[in-house]
Each structure stands twice: as C-alpha cells, then as structure tokens.
Image (cartoon, rainbow, N blue to C red):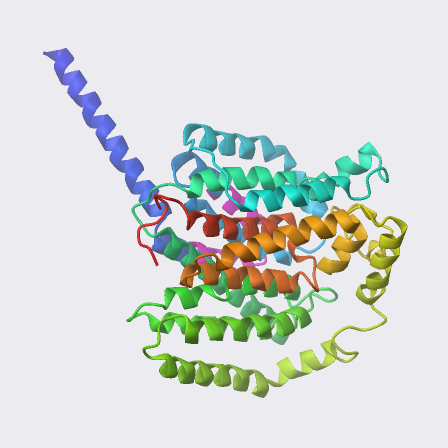
C-alpha cells in the first residue's frame, strides 16, 4: 500500500513539474514579458548601466536556452543587448574581462541544441553564405600571418563560415511546428527593438538638454549610425502587424520610428532611411488590396507630413543636421572619401583576391578601435578592395540569390522581410553594416531563413498563411 501511495506522489510531483515548466516556457515567450524586457532595458540605459544590462540579459538568454525548447524567446533579449550596447563605444577591454564566463554560455548553447535537437536542413540562401565564405578565405591570401588570422578570426570566420554554422543552427530551430504564428511574433519583436531605439534617443536628447551627454564621439548620448541601422531593420514590421482590419493603427508606428530615425543625426540614416521609408509607404499603399487604397494613400501622406513638420519645427534637430552636413553628404577631407580610391588601388595590385579584410593599412586604420576590423565603411569598395574579382562574383551571387528569394511567390510577409533587408543593404553602403557579424549580418541571415521557410512543403513553422 505504501509503495502505491509513494508512486502516486511521484506521478503527481512529475505532473506538477511539467505544468510549472509549461507555464514558465509560456511566460518567457509572452508579450507581457517582452514589454517588461524593453522597459527594463530602457531603465538600464537611463541609469547608464549598459554593461551590467548586457550581463543581466546574457544570463536571461542562458536561462531561456536551458528552460525552453523554443529558440524564439531568446530573440528579443539578444536584440535588446545588441541595441543598448551600441552605447558602449570602444569598450573591448571592458567586455573582454568577462570572457572567463564564455564556457558557461557555450554550455547553455550546447545543452539547448543537444537536448532540444531539431532536424538539420539547408535551403537556397546557404549557397550565398558559402560563396561569401570562399571570398573571405581567399581574400588577400598569403598576405597575413597565422597570428593575424587568429586575431581577426571574429571577422574572418564570423562573416563566412561562422554564419554558415549559425544558419544551420537557427534554421533547424525556427523550422518547427508552433501553436502561434511566428511571423507575427517576430514582427512584434522587431517592432519592440525599434521601440527601445526610440527610448534611447529620447534619453540621449534629455542628457544633451541637461548637459550630461558625453563629449566626443557620441555627443548625442547614443551611437547615431548604429541606432539608425537598428531602426532601419525594424521600420517595415509595424506595417505587417497593421495589415489586418482593426489593427491598422499599428502602421502609424512605422512613421514614428522614421521620425526617430531622422532624429539620430546620422547622415546615412537620414538619406538611406528616407529611401527605405518611401519604399515602406509604397508597400503599405499597394500591398494590402485595392479596397481602401486611396484611404491608405491619404493617411500615409498625412502622417508623413506630420512627421516632417515635427522635425522641421524642431530647431535643435535642424541645427544638429546643419552641423553634420556643413561639408556636404560626404567630405573630401574624411577617410571614407579617401578609401574609395584606396579600394581601387588595392584591386589593381591584386585584382583576383584583393588585399583581404584583415588589411589595416587603409585610411581608417588610424581610427579603428581595439578588437574591431579596419572597415572601408562602404560595402562595394570593401568587396572590391578586400576580395577582388572573387569577392565581386561571390557577393554578387549572394545578392541575386537573396533578391530572388524575396520576389519568388512574393506576398506581404516576403516583401516585409525584403524591406528590412533593403534597409541594412542601403546602410551598408555608407557604414560597416553587413561587415559586422553580430548583430547585423546574423540578423540578415535570419531574415532569409524566414524567406526560405515560406517554401516548405508542410509549413510547420507558421500557424497562419499570409
């Protein structure tokens, strides 16, 4: 009799444990917890505790990896870390001290991908990643020592073979059946990332008004180009959320994000972001059916006009941009201008494989910070100068492959993802962009994993087709 009662208690305890685990998994992937994370991240930025915030959210990611069989709940905290740590300029020495905890993080990742293993598969975009990996390996081959390759491994391997590994892991985890529409969930996550960018800009301007902003590089209290890039990733997703009747007001958030984008004082953000915003407006007007098209047109025109008016009457904004554009969009005295010619000079010297992405002899080599790559800050010159004809062919192939995925059986979701990628592609022409492995290129890879999953014979990854 005692044995039977003990067995029943064990069964009851096991059932209770399962219920608690199920509730915890549900909570960690819930919208209220998402919103709490954004508020927490904003509070940490307000207190100037970005480094502590990175540790806290890193611990949260590790906990989620162990607790949840679903990878999606890790997406928002990862993006929040990527966003608020843009305030930590030239902080290699600060963060390298935490490398001792890397084994714990790696153990959590290993636990998740082993215990919650999903079937591995590849799709069309892997070939572009492998092509880019080849270009990176061959770029400047013979110009660097083994030690130089080791020191630059984060970029040399991270942008190529590292992205291939990340692709395999992410695709296996995102291509599984869920009880919710992952498209909407991801659109909400990206929109919330945009919301944190807006909060950081507000905090930055408040610091300026109180004379508390740092001098020098980030005199606005935030990183203009990096925040602008994150906003350009987020820009189209509120439109996707607002595609359904009764939720049209979500679309207004895209205009709000554009207003904040214009407030960053980033020249690339202002110019490239405006191009992306026009594309977003066309997407909103044309892609949601003929019914109500003129109404959407006038609403779009009205909201955009209001945003422009607010920016125009904002005296400080005009003053900031006036100073930023004193010498034109690009000045002949800045390193970026000089590096255009340097790219072609290196191409002439080695037209087949260029000088390699680890080449630090270009003009920006005098400005790059510890632990970073010597960027051209322009994608096309970077490819031409660093990887020559091989790079042009490989990056060209990846570009055509990605464009093909966007427009193959296009729908509102594929074009939304395409607009997000369009933003980072534009920004990469005037900033490091896709030559930053984390978060920019990793996020670009994820966008095209979502594109691929549209063509699964059995769309297990989504709840609704749209």
Q: Is residue 46 magenta?
A: yes
> What residue sits 9% from the left and 11% below the top?
1
Q: Quadrant of residue 430?
A: bottom right
Q: Foreground: 58 or 114?
A: 114
Q: Foreground: 338 or 14?
A: 338
> What residue sits 47% from the left and 56% below the top?
408
Q: On the rendered image, what quadrant is the C terminus found in?
A: bottom left
Measuring from the top left, give residue 93's x and y in whole percent: 72, 45
**262 shown above or below 135:** below
**402 shown above or below 278:** above
Span highlighted in magenta in the image: 36-60
Horizontal relation, residue 116 to residue 448: left or right:
left
Q: Quadrant of residue 331?
A: bottom right
> What residue sits 59% from the left and 51% below the top?
439
Q: Residue furthest left?
A: 1
Q: Foreground: 298 or 149?
A: 298
Residue 85 can be seen in this image: no
Horizontal relation, residue 156 to residue 30: left or right:
right
Horizontal relation, residue 346 to residue 403: left or right:
right
**214 shown above or below 36:** below
Q: Foreground: 285 or 456?
A: 456
Measuring from the top left, give residue 45's x and y in whole percent: 55, 59
**266 shown above or below 149:** below
Residue 88 can be seen in this image: yes
Q: Is residue 320 magenta?
A: no
Measuring from the top left, give residue 34's x and y in whole percent: 40, 54
Measuring from the top left, give residue 196's x and y in whole percent: 50, 62
Q: Quadrant of residue 24?
A: top left
Horizontal relation, residue 214 to residue 177: left or right:
right
């Amino acid at each position: 009799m005692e044995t039977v009662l003990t067995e029943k208690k064990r069964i009851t305890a096991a059932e209770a444990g399962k219920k608690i685990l199920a509730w915890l998994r549900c909570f960690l992937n819930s919208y209220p917890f998402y919103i709490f994370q954004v508020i927490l991240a904003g509070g940490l930025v307000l207190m100037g505790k970005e480094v502590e915030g990175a540790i806290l959210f890193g611990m949260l990611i590790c906990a989620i990896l162990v607790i949840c069989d679903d990878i999606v709940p890790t997406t928002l905290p990862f993006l929040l870390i990527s966003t608020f740590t843009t305030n930590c300029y030239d902080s290699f020495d600060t963060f390298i001290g935490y490398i001792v905890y890397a084994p714990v993080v790696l153990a959590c990742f290993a636990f998740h991908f082993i215990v919650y293993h999903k079937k591995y598969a590849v799709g069309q975009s892997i070939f572009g990643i492998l092509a880019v990996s080849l270009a990176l390996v061959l770029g400047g081959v013979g110009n660097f020592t083994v030690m130089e390759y080791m020191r630059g491994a984060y970029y040399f391997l991270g942008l190529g073979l590292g992205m291939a590994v990340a692709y395999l892991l992410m695709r296996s985890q995102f291509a599984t059946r869920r009880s919710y529409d992952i498209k909407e969930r991801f659109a909400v996550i990206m929109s919330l990332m945009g919301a944190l960018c807006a909060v950081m800009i507000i905090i930055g301007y408040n610091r300026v008004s109180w004379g508390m902003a740092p001098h020098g590089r980030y005199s606005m209290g935030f990183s203009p180009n990096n925040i602008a890039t994150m906003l350009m990733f987020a820009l189209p997703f509120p439109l996707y959320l607002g595609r359904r009747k009764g939720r049209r007001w979500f679309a207004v958030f895209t205009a709000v994000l554009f207003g904040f984008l214009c407030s960053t004082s980033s020249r690339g953000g202002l110019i490239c972001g405006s191009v992306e915003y026009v594309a977003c407006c066309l997407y909103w007007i044309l892609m949601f059916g003929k019914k109500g098209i003129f109404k959407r047109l006038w609403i779009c025109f009205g909201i955009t006009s209001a945003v422009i008016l607010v920016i125009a009457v904002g005296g400080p904004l005009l003053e900031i941009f006036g100073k930023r554009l004193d010498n034109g969009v690009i000045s002949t005295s800045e390193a970026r201008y000089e590096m255009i010619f340097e790219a072609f000079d290196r191409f002439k010297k080695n037209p087949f494989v260029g000088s390699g992405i680890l080449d630090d002899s270009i003009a920006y080599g005098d400005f790059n910070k510890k632990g970073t790559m010597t960027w051209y800050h322009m994608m096309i010159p970077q490819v031409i100068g660093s990887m020559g004809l091989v790079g042009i062919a490989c990056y060209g192939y990846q570009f055509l492959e990605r464009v093909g995925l966007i427009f193959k059986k296009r729908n509102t979701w594929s074009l939304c993802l395409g607009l997000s990628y369009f933003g980072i592609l534009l920004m990469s022409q005037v900033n490091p962009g896709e030559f930053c492995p984390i978060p920019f290129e990793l996020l670009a890879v994820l966008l095209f994993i979502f594109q691929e999953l549209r063509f699964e014979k059995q769309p297990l990854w989504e709840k609704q087709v749209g």
